[in-house]
Image (tube, rainbow, N blue to C red):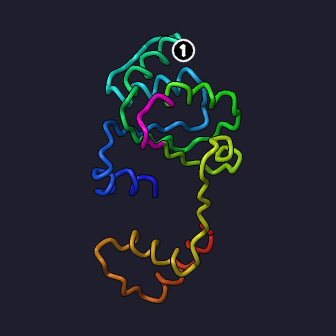
Amino acid sequence: LAQHVYNDPKIEDAKFDIKAWVCVSDHFHVLTVTRTILEAVTDKTDDSGNLEMVHKKLKGKLSGKKFLLVLDDVWNERREEWEAVRTPLSYGAPGSRILVTTRGEKVASNMRSKVHLLKQLEEDECWKVFANHAFKDGDHEFNDELKVIGRRIVEKCD
Protein backbone atom coordinates (compact mmCIF):
# COMPACT_ATOMS: atom_id res chain seq x y z
CA LEU A 1 0.00 0.00 0.00
CA ALA A 2 2.80 2.41 0.87
CA GLN A 3 4.48 1.68 -2.48
CA HIS A 4 1.25 2.52 -4.29
CA VAL A 5 1.01 5.82 -2.43
CA TYR A 6 4.68 6.63 -3.04
CA ASN A 7 4.41 5.87 -6.77
CA ASP A 8 0.94 7.34 -7.32
CA PRO A 9 0.91 9.98 -10.10
CA LYS A 10 -1.07 12.27 -7.76
CA ILE A 11 2.07 12.52 -5.62
CA GLU A 12 3.68 14.37 -8.53
CA ASP A 13 0.85 16.91 -8.29
CA ALA A 14 1.82 17.54 -4.65
CA LYS A 15 5.14 18.90 -5.95
CA PHE A 16 7.50 17.45 -3.37
CA ASP A 17 11.04 18.76 -3.73
CA ILE A 18 12.41 15.52 -2.30
CA LYS A 19 11.04 11.98 -2.23
CA ALA A 20 12.88 9.27 -0.32
CA TRP A 21 12.20 5.69 0.80
CA VAL A 22 14.12 4.22 3.75
CA CYS A 23 13.80 0.64 4.96
CA VAL A 24 14.36 0.82 8.72
CA SER A 25 13.73 -2.78 9.84
CA ASP A 26 14.56 -4.09 13.31
CA HIS A 27 18.24 -3.10 13.60
CA PHE A 28 17.58 0.41 14.85
CA HIS A 29 20.36 2.79 15.73
CA VAL A 30 19.74 6.56 15.69
CA LEU A 31 22.94 7.42 13.80
CA THR A 32 22.48 4.64 11.25
CA VAL A 33 18.83 5.50 10.53
CA THR A 34 19.55 9.24 10.31
CA ARG A 35 22.52 8.63 8.02
CA THR A 36 20.40 6.30 5.85
CA ILE A 37 17.76 9.03 5.53
CA LEU A 38 20.48 11.53 4.56
CA GLU A 39 21.83 9.11 1.94
CA ALA A 40 18.34 8.53 0.52
CA VAL A 41 17.76 12.28 0.30
CA THR A 42 21.13 13.10 -1.29
CA ASP A 43 21.78 9.88 -3.27
CA LYS A 44 25.30 9.98 -1.82
CA THR A 45 27.04 7.72 0.69
CA ASP A 46 27.90 9.35 4.00
CA ASP A 47 30.39 7.69 6.31
CA SER A 48 30.22 10.22 9.13
CA GLY A 49 30.24 8.67 12.59
CA ASN A 50 29.04 11.83 14.30
CA LEU A 51 25.28 12.17 14.86
CA GLU A 52 25.47 15.93 15.23
CA MET A 53 27.24 16.24 11.87
CA VAL A 54 24.69 13.99 10.15
CA HIS A 55 21.84 15.99 11.71
CA LYS A 56 23.40 19.23 10.45
CA LYS A 57 23.78 17.87 6.89
CA LEU A 58 20.23 16.48 6.84
CA LYS A 59 18.81 19.71 8.27
CA GLY A 60 20.64 21.63 5.53
CA LYS A 61 19.22 19.40 2.78
CA LEU A 62 15.64 19.55 4.09
CA SER A 63 15.41 23.15 5.32
CA GLY A 64 12.62 24.92 3.49
CA LYS A 65 12.01 21.98 1.16
CA LYS A 66 8.78 20.05 0.90
CA PHE A 67 9.55 16.35 1.21
CA LEU A 68 7.88 12.95 1.26
CA LEU A 69 9.75 10.40 3.35
CA VAL A 70 8.67 6.79 3.73
CA LEU A 71 10.11 4.98 6.75
CA ASP A 72 9.31 1.37 5.96
CA ASP A 73 9.06 -1.60 8.33
CA VAL A 74 9.72 0.22 11.60
CA TRP A 75 10.00 -1.88 14.75
CA ASN A 76 11.64 0.44 17.29
CA GLU A 77 9.30 1.40 20.14
CA ARG A 78 11.64 3.75 22.05
CA ARG A 79 10.16 7.24 21.76
CA GLU A 80 13.34 9.11 22.75
CA GLU A 81 15.25 7.50 19.87
CA TRP A 82 12.52 8.50 17.43
CA GLU A 83 12.65 12.06 18.74
CA ALA A 84 16.37 12.13 17.94
CA VAL A 85 15.70 10.91 14.38
CA ARG A 86 12.84 13.40 13.91
CA THR A 87 14.84 16.47 14.95
CA PRO A 88 16.32 17.35 11.52
CA LEU A 89 13.09 16.31 9.78
CA SER A 90 11.21 19.15 11.47
CA TYR A 91 12.99 21.73 9.28
CA GLY A 92 11.13 20.74 6.11
CA ALA A 93 8.66 23.10 4.48
CA PRO A 94 4.95 23.02 5.34
CA GLY A 95 3.26 20.17 3.52
CA SER A 96 6.14 17.76 4.10
CA ARG A 97 5.00 14.26 4.96
CA ILE A 98 6.49 11.22 6.69
CA LEU A 99 4.77 7.91 6.02
CA VAL A 100 5.69 5.13 8.45
CA THR A 101 4.85 1.47 7.94
CA THR A 102 4.88 -0.79 10.97
CA ARG A 103 3.20 -3.81 12.46
CA GLY A 104 3.33 -2.40 15.98
CA GLU A 105 0.65 -0.08 17.35
CA LYS A 106 3.09 1.28 19.94
CA VAL A 107 5.46 2.32 17.15
CA ALA A 108 2.61 4.12 15.44
CA SER A 109 1.55 5.91 18.61
CA ASN A 110 5.16 7.00 19.26
CA MET A 111 5.09 8.81 15.93
CA ARG A 112 2.36 11.08 17.32
CA SER A 113 0.43 11.12 14.10
CA LYS A 114 -2.65 9.69 12.47
CA VAL A 115 -2.73 5.89 12.59
CA HIS A 116 -4.41 3.76 9.93
CA LEU A 117 -4.95 0.16 10.95
CA LEU A 118 -5.25 -2.18 7.99
CA LYS A 119 -7.69 -5.02 8.45
CA GLN A 120 -7.17 -8.56 7.27
CA LEU A 121 -8.70 -9.38 3.91
CA GLU A 122 -11.76 -11.62 3.73
CA GLU A 123 -11.08 -15.15 2.53
CA ASP A 124 -12.61 -14.55 -0.92
CA GLU A 125 -10.44 -11.46 -1.38
CA CYS A 126 -7.36 -13.46 -0.33
CA TRP A 127 -8.29 -16.10 -2.90
CA LYS A 128 -8.48 -13.42 -5.64
CA VAL A 129 -5.03 -12.10 -4.70
CA PHE A 130 -3.61 -15.64 -4.64
CA ALA A 131 -5.21 -16.57 -7.97
CA ASN A 132 -3.93 -13.40 -9.66
CA HIS A 133 -0.37 -14.14 -8.55
CA ALA A 134 -0.49 -17.88 -9.14
CA PHE A 135 -1.89 -17.53 -12.65
CA LYS A 136 -0.43 -14.32 -14.02
CA ASP A 137 -1.52 -15.06 -17.58
CA GLY A 138 -5.13 -14.45 -16.56
CA ASP A 139 -6.20 -18.08 -16.88
CA HIS A 140 -8.51 -18.38 -13.89
CA GLU A 141 -10.12 -21.61 -15.07
CA PHE A 142 -8.66 -24.00 -12.51
CA ASN A 143 -9.32 -27.66 -12.38
CA ASP A 144 -10.91 -28.80 -9.11
CA GLU A 145 -7.69 -30.28 -7.73
CA LEU A 146 -5.73 -27.03 -8.19
CA LYS A 147 -8.59 -25.05 -6.70
CA VAL A 148 -8.63 -27.23 -3.56
CA ILE A 149 -4.85 -26.92 -3.18
CA GLY A 150 -4.98 -23.16 -3.72
CA ARG A 151 -7.78 -22.72 -1.18
CA ARG A 152 -5.77 -24.70 1.38
CA ILE A 153 -2.76 -22.47 0.80
CA VAL A 154 -4.90 -19.36 1.25
CA GLU A 155 -6.37 -20.81 4.44
CA LYS A 156 -2.92 -21.65 5.86
CA CYS A 157 -1.62 -18.18 5.05
CA ASP A 158 -4.56 -16.74 6.97
Residue 136 highlighted magenta (yes or no)? no
Vertical relation: 83 (above or below) 155? above
**Picture coordinates of residue 37, whole percent (x, y):** 45, 29
- Segment colored magenta: 90-97
Toward which corner of the image does residue 59 lie, by quadrant?
top left
Q: Residues within 10 Å of mark 1 (few under 14, many from 20)?
A: some
Towards the viewer: 77 or 92: 92
**Picture coordinates of residue 60, whole percent (x, y):** 39, 20
**Picture coordinates of residue 82, whole percent (x, y):** 62, 31
Residue type at mark 1 is Leu
**Picture coordinates of residue 149, whole percent (x, y):** 53, 78
List the residue tagged with mark 1: 51
Vertical relation: 116 (above or below) 27? below
Q: Main secondary structure of the magenta part?
A: loop
Toward which corner of the image does residue 19 lie, by quadrant?
top left
Which residue is found at the position 41% from the left and 35% from the top? 93
Which residue is found at the position 52% from the left and 10% from the top? 50
Which residue is found at the position 32% from the left and 71% from the top? 136
The quadrant the C terminus occupies is bottom right
